[in-house]
Image (cartoon, rainbow, N blue to C red):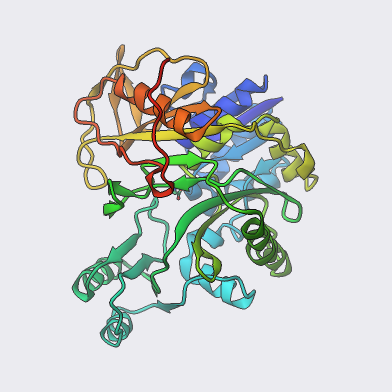
Amino acid sequence: MRVLVIGGGGREHAIVHACARAGHEVLCTPGNPGIAKMARLLDSPQDAASLAQLAQREGADVVIVGPEAYLAAGVVDACTALGVPAFGPVQAASRLEGDKVWSKAFMTRHGIPTAAHHSFTALEAALAHLAGLSTTSPIVVKDAALKAGKGVTLAHSVAEAETALREIFSGPDAQAVIEEFMTGQEVTILALTDGERYALTPPSQDHKTIHEGDTGPMTGGMGVICPFPVDDATMTAIRQTIIEPTLRGMKAEGHPFCGVLYAGLMLTPSGPKVVEFNARFGDPEAEAVLPLLESDLAQHALDAARGELDPSSVRFRAAASAVVILAAPGYPGEPQRGIPLTLPPTQENEVIYHAGTRMDGDQLRSHGGRVLAVTATAPTLNAALGRAYALADRVDFPGAQLRRDLGGRIGAVPEPSTV
Ligand code: GLY
């Protein structure tokens, strides 16, 4: 099969890797230097119409869309209009991620458990609500629009929440959500779906703040462990109270959700609740989950795009994975670009996915906030963590930021790597 992957980060590198592993011819736009080693990169304008025409011209059997911005711009709608199967939600369905006010209202309409919340279209109303709050817990302030994972502030004071709200409402057409702070373990559940049938990937856990101990500002994600242990009763609750009502609700409202439904959940004392929905593979969750996929991602994508997903055909290895993100100095503020990078050789079950890199002649350089996603799989989580950290330590990346406490929330301890 000829597969066109759209995007150019670590998630898309993992998607390309999964498709190439299954023996498919893979094309990618815009791609990155790591992807270039396993796919043919295509130079193209990145608007929806141009990408759909590119897919048609190149004879792609299926298009897999990585980043949310392309979904929100309607790339799946444009491909569908040209008769090219595309794996991802149409623009109207991508609102589940792209518009947090709409998404919260959808959850309320369908009784899907989530944090208590209030949505605002004006700063004054949001500030008045803030003034009336009498909580000692942190206050969660969310920008309703797409912000590459950085639109959430966990404010530890009313003043901090006010600053976040003023920042959100400094732009045009802004909307904000203020919500209850939930406690518990956070887990990511990804559902591959054709809009009705679905298969879940193994649960995973991202580490969203820049610093260890879950401190500092939010990032797009600094590292992932997979599988995150979730007991059977909780998995049943996740399926029955979150995934299934969401798919049924999206279909009932006239925009079935095809693609990857990302459910960011909190396992609270009163059951699993939605922190956020996203409309695509997580990044870096994809870099943890996809190396464990045994079956054929491109085939699943094509089946889902045709409305014929067979959930029993989606299979994962019974193993564990760990992803250590190496981020540039300055991230999640202004990342330093152009830092020379030297990557070590990798062994079997290790991959260094490129997230923000570029070639400068023969020299690889940093070119973004999150730069590399260093991934290892192993029979146990502790072994996977040990291998991923050992590999990360062999990367020559002056000033790189990484978190050394991945898996610590569940007591995982990196096993000294003998590889
Ligand atoms: N890792 C968080 C996200 O993909 O949004």
Give the percent coordinates (x, y) of residue 304: 73, 44
Q: Is residue 52 visible?
A: yes
Left or right: 44 in relation to 343: right
Residue 382 position by quadrant: top left
Q: 90 and 229: which one is in front?
A: 229
Q: Does residue 36 sit above or below 308 in this rendering?
A: above
Give the percent coordinates (x, y) of residue 215: 26, 53
| Residue displayed at 29% across by 88% down | 132
- The total number of labels drawn is 0
Q: Does residue 212 sit above or below 267 in this rendering?
A: above
Left or right: 89 in relation to 66: right
| Quadrant into which the C terminus falls | top left
Q: 274 and 409: which one is in front?
A: 409
Q: 180 and 330: which one is in front?
A: 180
| Residue displayed at 28% across by 23% down | 365
Give the percent coordinates (x, y) of residue 209: 31, 50
Residue 156 position by quadrant: bottom left
Left or right: 319 in relation to 362: right
Q: Does residue 285 sit above or below 127 in this rendering?
A: above
Q: Does residue 230 sit above or below 25 in this rendering?
A: below
| Quadrant into which the N terminus falls | top right
Q: Is residue 9 visible?
A: no
